[in-house]
Amino acid sequence: MKLGIVGLPNVGKSTLFNSLTKAGAESANYPFCTIDPNVGVVTVPDERIRLLGELYHTKKVTPAVIEFVDIAGLVKGASKGEGLGNQFLANIREVDAIVHVVRCFEDSNIVHVDGSINPLRDIETINLELIFSDLEVLERRLSKVSKAARMDKTCAKELALLERIKAHLEEGKLAKVFETEDAIKKGAQEIDYVVNITQLKEKNYDYVEKEMAAIVAACRRENVCSKVIFENCYLEREEKLALCAIARDVRPDFIKTSTGFGTGGAVLEDVELMKNAVGEAVKIKAAGGIRTLEDALQMIGLGVSRIGSTASVDIVEELKRKRKGI
Ligand SMILES: Nc1nc2c(ncn2[C@@H]2O[C@H](COP(=O)(O)OP(=O)(O)OP(=O)(O)O)[C@@H](O)[C@H]2O)c(=O)[nH]1
Ligand SMILES: [Mg+2]
Protein backbone atom coordinates (compact mmCIF):
# COMPACT_ATOMS: atom_id res chain seq x y z
CA MET A 1 0.00 0.00 0.00
CA LYS A 2 1.20 3.47 -0.90
CA LEU A 3 0.36 6.60 1.11
CA GLY A 4 1.02 10.18 0.03
CA ILE A 5 1.66 12.90 2.63
CA VAL A 6 0.24 16.33 1.75
CA GLY A 7 -0.23 19.63 3.56
CA LEU A 8 0.84 23.26 3.66
CA PRO A 9 4.60 23.95 3.72
CA ASN A 10 6.39 23.78 7.08
CA VAL A 11 3.60 21.99 8.94
CA GLY A 12 5.54 18.85 9.84
CA LYS A 13 5.08 16.53 6.87
CA SER A 14 8.74 15.47 6.73
CA THR A 15 8.84 15.21 10.53
CA LEU A 16 5.94 12.75 10.39
CA PHE A 17 7.53 10.97 7.43
CA ASN A 18 10.79 10.56 9.38
CA SER A 19 9.11 9.30 12.50
CA LEU A 20 7.18 6.73 10.45
CA THR A 21 10.00 5.58 8.18
CA LYS A 22 13.19 6.51 10.07
CA ALA A 23 14.43 7.53 6.62
CA GLY A 24 16.15 10.70 7.83
CA ALA A 25 14.63 13.05 5.25
CA GLU A 26 15.55 16.69 5.63
CA SER A 27 13.17 18.56 7.88
CA ALA A 28 13.81 22.20 8.68
CA ASN A 29 12.11 25.33 9.85
CA TYR A 30 11.47 26.98 6.52
CA PRO A 31 8.72 26.53 3.93
CA PHE A 32 9.45 24.36 0.89
CA CYS A 33 12.30 22.50 2.60
CA THR A 34 11.18 19.43 0.66
CA ILE A 35 11.27 19.82 -3.12
CA ASP A 36 11.94 16.36 -4.50
CA PRO A 37 9.67 13.76 -2.99
CA ASN A 38 11.01 11.50 -0.24
CA VAL A 39 9.99 7.90 -0.47
CA GLY A 40 10.21 5.54 2.46
CA VAL A 41 9.11 1.97 2.98
CA VAL A 42 8.14 0.53 6.34
CA THR A 43 7.25 -3.02 7.15
CA VAL A 44 4.05 -3.67 9.00
CA PRO A 45 4.78 -5.41 12.29
CA ASP A 46 2.68 -8.55 12.51
CA GLU A 47 3.26 -11.18 15.16
CA ARG A 48 1.24 -13.72 13.14
CA ILE A 49 3.73 -13.64 10.24
CA ARG A 50 6.60 -14.52 12.58
CA LEU A 51 4.67 -17.39 14.12
CA LEU A 52 3.64 -18.72 10.71
CA GLY A 53 7.26 -18.49 9.52
CA GLU A 54 8.39 -20.55 12.51
CA LEU A 55 5.59 -23.04 12.09
CA TYR A 56 6.37 -23.76 8.45
CA HIS A 57 10.16 -23.26 8.75
CA THR A 58 9.98 -20.74 5.92
CA LYS A 59 13.38 -19.51 4.79
CA LYS A 60 12.15 -16.10 3.80
CA VAL A 61 9.43 -14.11 5.54
CA THR A 62 8.07 -11.14 3.61
CA PRO A 63 5.94 -8.82 5.69
CA ALA A 64 3.41 -6.40 4.25
CA VAL A 65 4.89 -2.98 3.53
CA ILE A 66 3.60 0.54 3.45
CA GLU A 67 5.28 3.04 1.19
CA PHE A 68 5.13 6.68 2.21
CA VAL A 69 5.69 9.52 -0.23
CA ASP A 70 6.50 12.85 1.41
CA ILE A 71 6.06 15.68 -1.07
CA ALA A 72 6.53 19.43 -1.29
CA GLY A 73 4.03 21.68 0.50
CA LEU A 74 1.01 23.07 -1.33
CA VAL A 75 -0.11 26.67 -0.86
CA LYS A 76 -3.26 28.58 -1.74
CA GLY A 77 -3.21 29.11 -5.51
CA ALA A 78 -0.76 26.23 -6.11
CA SER A 79 -2.97 25.09 -8.97
CA LYS A 80 -2.26 28.47 -10.60
CA GLY A 81 1.47 28.20 -9.99
CA GLU A 82 1.79 29.77 -6.52
CA GLY A 83 4.60 28.40 -4.34
CA LEU A 84 6.07 25.41 -6.10
CA GLY A 85 2.88 24.93 -8.11
CA ASN A 86 1.13 21.59 -7.99
CA GLN A 87 3.05 19.65 -10.60
CA PHE A 88 4.49 17.39 -7.93
CA LEU A 89 0.97 16.19 -7.14
CA ALA A 90 1.65 13.73 -9.95
CA ASN A 91 3.89 12.05 -7.36
CA ILE A 92 0.93 11.18 -5.23
CA ARG A 93 -1.48 10.41 -8.02
CA GLU A 94 -0.53 6.76 -7.86
CA VAL A 95 -0.97 6.41 -4.11
CA ASP A 96 -3.81 4.48 -2.52
CA ALA A 97 -4.59 7.05 0.16
CA ILE A 98 -3.64 10.56 1.14
CA VAL A 99 -2.40 11.54 4.59
CA HIS A 100 -3.18 15.19 5.16
CA VAL A 101 -0.93 16.78 7.80
CA VAL A 102 -2.55 19.77 9.49
CA ARG A 103 -0.68 22.04 11.84
CA CYS A 104 -2.29 22.48 15.25
CA PHE A 105 0.80 23.24 17.32
CA GLU A 106 1.53 26.77 18.50
CA ASP A 107 5.17 27.78 18.12
CA SER A 108 6.11 31.34 17.24
CA ASN A 109 9.51 30.15 15.98
CA ILE A 110 7.98 27.98 13.24
CA VAL A 111 6.69 30.05 10.33
CA HIS A 112 3.14 29.41 9.15
CA VAL A 113 2.74 30.39 5.49
CA ASP A 114 -0.68 31.91 6.14
CA GLY A 115 0.41 33.78 9.25
CA SER A 116 -1.74 32.15 11.92
CA ILE A 117 -2.74 28.78 13.36
CA ASN A 118 -6.11 27.83 11.87
CA PRO A 119 -6.47 24.10 11.13
CA LEU A 120 -9.95 24.37 9.55
CA ARG A 121 -8.85 27.07 7.13
CA ASP A 122 -5.73 25.05 6.26
CA ILE A 123 -7.77 21.91 5.56
CA GLU A 124 -9.98 23.87 3.17
CA THR A 125 -6.98 25.41 1.40
CA ILE A 126 -5.47 22.01 0.72
CA ASN A 127 -8.78 20.37 -0.21
CA LEU A 128 -9.43 23.11 -2.71
CA GLU A 129 -6.01 22.74 -4.31
CA LEU A 130 -6.57 18.99 -4.58
CA ILE A 131 -9.93 19.62 -6.22
CA PHE A 132 -8.36 22.04 -8.71
CA SER A 133 -5.72 19.50 -9.49
CA ASP A 134 -8.39 16.83 -10.08
CA LEU A 135 -10.22 19.25 -12.34
CA GLU A 136 -7.12 19.77 -14.48
CA VAL A 137 -6.73 16.03 -14.96
CA LEU A 138 -10.43 15.72 -15.66
CA GLU A 139 -10.42 18.47 -18.24
CA ARG A 140 -7.51 16.93 -20.12
CA ARG A 141 -9.32 13.60 -20.16
CA LEU A 142 -12.60 15.27 -21.16
CA SER A 143 -11.12 16.90 -24.24
CA LYS A 144 -9.67 13.55 -25.34
CA VAL A 145 -12.82 11.55 -24.68
CA SER A 146 -15.28 14.05 -26.14
CA LYS A 147 -13.75 13.59 -29.61
CA ALA A 148 -13.78 9.81 -29.39
CA ALA A 149 -17.30 9.73 -27.91
CA ARG A 150 -18.93 10.55 -31.24
CA MET A 151 -17.78 7.23 -32.66
CA ASP A 152 -17.50 5.01 -29.64
CA LYS A 153 -20.22 4.01 -27.15
CA THR A 154 -17.84 3.21 -24.29
CA CYS A 155 -16.26 6.62 -24.64
CA ALA A 156 -19.71 8.22 -24.67
CA LYS A 157 -20.43 6.57 -21.32
CA GLU A 158 -17.14 7.75 -19.91
CA LEU A 159 -17.83 11.24 -21.19
CA ALA A 160 -21.17 11.37 -19.37
CA LEU A 161 -19.49 10.22 -16.15
CA LEU A 162 -16.66 12.73 -16.49
CA GLU A 163 -19.11 15.53 -17.01
CA ARG A 164 -21.01 14.59 -13.88
CA ILE A 165 -17.83 14.49 -11.83
CA LYS A 166 -16.75 17.83 -13.23
CA ALA A 167 -20.04 19.48 -12.28
CA HIS A 168 -19.73 18.00 -8.82
CA LEU A 169 -16.21 19.28 -8.34
CA GLU A 170 -17.01 22.68 -9.75
CA GLU A 171 -20.27 23.53 -8.06
CA GLY A 172 -21.30 21.06 -5.45
CA LYS A 173 -18.35 21.02 -3.25
CA LEU A 174 -17.07 24.34 -2.15
CA ALA A 175 -18.39 27.03 -4.46
CA LYS A 176 -20.70 28.64 -1.89
CA VAL A 177 -18.00 28.56 0.76
CA PHE A 178 -15.72 30.31 -1.67
CA GLU A 179 -18.31 33.00 -2.32
CA THR A 180 -18.90 33.36 1.42
CA GLU A 181 -15.23 33.91 2.13
CA ASP A 182 -14.93 36.28 -0.78
CA ALA A 183 -17.90 38.36 0.43
CA ILE A 184 -16.47 38.49 3.95
CA LYS A 185 -13.09 39.55 2.59
CA LYS A 186 -14.81 42.36 0.72
CA GLY A 187 -16.39 43.57 3.97
CA ALA A 188 -19.66 41.66 4.39
CA GLN A 189 -20.78 41.58 8.01
CA GLU A 190 -23.66 39.21 7.49
CA ILE A 191 -24.07 36.30 5.09
CA ASP A 192 -27.46 35.10 3.85
CA TYR A 193 -27.50 32.00 1.68
CA VAL A 194 -30.29 29.88 0.26
CA VAL A 195 -30.14 26.14 0.89
CA ASN A 196 -29.75 23.92 -2.16
CA ILE A 197 -33.43 23.17 -2.76
CA THR A 198 -32.77 20.46 -5.37
CA GLN A 199 -30.54 18.53 -2.99
CA LEU A 200 -33.10 18.94 -0.22
CA LYS A 201 -35.91 17.65 -2.43
CA GLU A 202 -33.78 14.65 -3.32
CA LYS A 203 -33.50 14.01 0.41
CA ASN A 204 -29.76 14.46 0.16
CA TYR A 205 -29.68 15.76 3.74
CA ASP A 206 -26.01 14.95 4.10
CA TYR A 207 -25.18 17.40 1.36
CA VAL A 208 -27.45 20.08 2.82
CA GLU A 209 -25.88 19.66 6.25
CA LYS A 210 -22.30 19.71 4.94
CA GLU A 211 -22.95 22.85 2.95
CA MET A 212 -24.61 24.56 5.92
CA ALA A 213 -21.80 23.54 8.27
CA ALA A 214 -19.10 24.79 5.88
CA ILE A 215 -20.74 28.17 5.29
CA VAL A 216 -21.56 28.71 8.97
CA ALA A 217 -17.97 27.75 9.89
CA ALA A 218 -16.58 30.26 7.37
CA CYS A 219 -18.76 32.97 8.98
CA ARG A 220 -17.95 31.97 12.53
CA ARG A 221 -14.21 32.13 11.85
CA GLU A 222 -14.57 35.81 11.00
CA ASN A 223 -17.27 36.64 13.55
CA VAL A 224 -19.81 37.24 10.81
CA CYS A 225 -23.53 36.63 11.29
CA SER A 226 -24.84 33.64 9.29
CA LYS A 227 -28.39 33.23 8.01
CA VAL A 228 -29.77 30.18 6.28
CA ILE A 229 -32.70 30.93 3.98
CA PHE A 230 -35.19 28.10 3.60
CA GLU A 231 -37.38 29.64 0.85
CA ASN A 232 -40.38 27.95 2.43
CA CYS A 233 -42.74 28.70 -0.46
CA TYR A 234 -41.12 25.86 -2.43
CA LEU A 235 -40.92 23.36 0.42
CA GLU A 236 -43.10 20.61 1.84
CA ARG A 237 -43.66 20.43 5.58
CA GLU A 238 -41.32 17.43 5.87
CA GLU A 239 -38.56 19.35 4.06
CA LYS A 240 -38.94 22.36 6.34
CA LEU A 241 -38.70 20.08 9.38
CA ALA A 242 -35.61 18.36 7.97
CA LEU A 243 -33.93 21.75 7.54
CA CYS A 244 -34.83 22.78 11.09
CA ALA A 245 -33.31 19.56 12.43
CA ILE A 246 -30.08 20.22 10.51
CA ALA A 247 -30.02 23.83 11.72
CA ARG A 248 -30.44 22.68 15.32
CA ASP A 249 -27.19 20.77 14.95
CA VAL A 250 -25.23 23.24 12.86
CA ARG A 251 -26.41 26.37 14.72
CA PRO A 252 -26.34 29.21 12.23
CA ASP A 253 -27.18 32.56 13.84
CA PHE A 254 -30.53 32.68 12.05
CA ILE A 255 -32.83 30.59 9.94
CA LYS A 256 -34.80 32.78 7.59
CA THR A 257 -38.17 32.14 5.98
CA SER A 258 -37.71 33.53 2.47
CA THR A 259 -35.62 35.55 0.07
CA GLY A 260 -38.52 37.78 -0.92
CA PHE A 261 -37.95 36.77 -4.56
CA GLY A 262 -39.88 33.49 -4.46
CA THR A 263 -43.56 32.84 -5.09
CA GLY A 264 -44.39 33.48 -1.44
CA GLY A 265 -42.99 35.22 1.62
CA ALA A 266 -43.08 34.71 5.37
CA VAL A 267 -46.27 33.09 6.64
CA LEU A 268 -47.32 32.59 10.25
CA GLU A 269 -47.77 28.85 9.87
CA ASP A 270 -44.15 28.40 8.73
CA VAL A 271 -42.81 30.59 11.49
CA GLU A 272 -44.72 28.56 14.04
CA LEU A 273 -43.35 25.31 12.61
CA MET A 274 -39.78 26.67 12.62
CA LYS A 275 -40.05 27.96 16.19
CA ASN A 276 -41.48 24.69 17.48
CA ALA A 277 -38.69 22.78 15.76
CA VAL A 278 -35.65 24.85 16.75
CA GLY A 279 -36.80 26.38 20.05
CA GLU A 280 -34.13 28.65 21.49
CA ALA A 281 -31.27 26.93 19.64
CA VAL A 282 -31.43 29.17 16.55
CA LYS A 283 -33.02 32.58 16.06
CA ILE A 284 -35.61 33.14 13.35
CA LYS A 285 -35.77 35.91 10.80
CA ALA A 286 -39.05 36.46 8.99
CA ALA A 287 -38.77 38.15 5.62
CA GLY A 288 -40.84 38.55 2.51
CA GLY A 289 -44.29 40.08 2.23
CA ILE A 290 -44.34 41.74 5.65
CA ARG A 291 -46.08 45.04 4.96
CA THR A 292 -47.82 46.26 8.11
CA LEU A 293 -47.21 46.67 11.82
CA GLU A 294 -49.77 44.00 12.47
CA ASP A 295 -47.94 41.50 10.24
CA ALA A 296 -44.71 42.24 12.10
CA LEU A 297 -46.22 42.02 15.58
CA GLN A 298 -47.82 38.68 14.80
CA MET A 299 -44.47 37.33 13.68
CA ILE A 300 -42.75 38.67 16.80
CA GLY A 301 -45.49 37.14 18.92
CA LEU A 302 -44.56 33.73 17.51
CA GLY A 303 -40.93 34.14 18.55
CA VAL A 304 -39.30 35.79 15.53
CA SER A 305 -36.15 37.74 16.49
CA ARG A 306 -35.73 39.74 13.29
CA ILE A 307 -38.01 41.12 10.64
CA GLY A 308 -36.88 41.90 7.12
CA SER A 309 -39.16 44.19 5.19
CA THR A 310 -38.95 46.83 2.48
CA ALA A 311 -41.79 48.52 4.39
CA SER A 312 -39.75 48.73 7.60
CA VAL A 313 -39.77 52.55 7.76
CA ASP A 314 -43.57 52.63 7.37
CA ILE A 315 -43.94 49.91 10.01
CA VAL A 316 -41.82 51.82 12.53
CA GLU A 317 -43.70 55.05 11.78
CA GLU A 318 -46.98 53.19 12.32
CA LEU A 319 -45.68 51.95 15.66
CA LYS A 320 -44.64 55.45 16.71
CA ARG A 321 -48.06 56.84 15.82
CA LYS A 322 -49.76 54.08 17.73
CA ARG A 323 -47.64 54.71 20.81
CA LYS A 324 -48.49 58.38 20.70
CA GLY A 325 -52.12 57.38 20.39
CA ILE A 326 -52.61 59.06 17.03
N1 LIG B 1 6.76 22.85 17.86
C1 LIG B 1 6.59 21.90 16.92
N2 LIG B 1 7.40 21.96 15.82
C2 LIG B 1 7.21 21.02 14.85
C3 LIG B 1 6.21 20.01 14.95
N3 LIG B 1 6.26 19.24 13.82
C4 LIG B 1 7.25 19.78 13.07
N4 LIG B 1 7.82 20.84 13.69
C5 LIG B 1 8.89 21.69 13.17
O1 LIG B 1 8.40 22.39 12.06
C6 LIG B 1 9.42 22.61 11.09
C7 LIG B 1 8.96 22.12 9.74
O2 LIG B 1 8.82 20.69 9.77
P1 LIG B 1 8.94 19.82 8.46
O3 LIG B 1 8.65 18.43 8.87
O4 LIG B 1 10.21 20.11 7.72
O5 LIG B 1 7.73 20.41 7.64
P2 LIG B 1 7.22 20.06 6.13
O6 LIG B 1 5.74 20.10 6.21
O7 LIG B 1 7.87 18.84 5.64
O8 LIG B 1 7.73 21.35 5.35
P3 LIG B 1 8.06 21.52 3.76
O9 LIG B 1 8.84 20.36 3.30
O10 LIG B 1 8.84 22.79 3.74
O11 LIG B 1 6.75 21.66 3.11
C8 LIG B 1 10.67 21.86 11.61
O12 LIG B 1 11.52 22.82 12.24
C9 LIG B 1 10.06 20.88 12.61
O13 LIG B 1 11.01 20.58 13.64
C10 LIG B 1 5.41 19.97 16.15
O14 LIG B 1 4.52 19.12 16.32
N5 LIG B 1 5.63 20.94 17.06
MG1 LIG C 1 9.09 18.49 4.03
Image: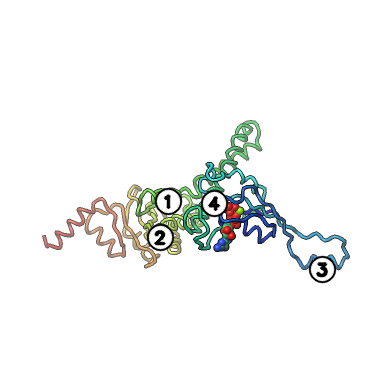
Sequence-wise first label, 1 or 2: 1
Three-letter amino acid code at the position of disc 2: Pro
**How far apart are the alpha carbons under marks 2 and 4?**
23 Å
Sequence-wise first label, 3 or 2: 3
Sequence-wise first label, 1 or 3: 3
Q: Which mark's residue is nearer the viewer, 2 or 4?
A: 4
User: 29 and 134: which one is in front?
Assistant: 29
Question: Is disc 4 placed on a helix, strand or loop?
Answer: helix
- The residue sitting at 53% across, 58% down in the picture is 110
In the picture of the structure, the residue carrying the numbered disc 1 is 181
**Whole-percent x, y for residue 208 in the image:** 47, 55
**How far apart are the alpha carbons under marks 1 and 4?**
15 Å
In the picture of the structure, the residue carrying the numbered disc 3 is 51
Three-letter amino acid code at the position of disc 1: Glu
Ligand 1, image quadrant it occupies: bottom right
Sequence-wise first label, 2 or 4: 4
Three-letter amino acid code at the position of disc 3: Leu
Instruction: Look at the image and tell me in which quarter the N terminus lies.
Output: bottom right
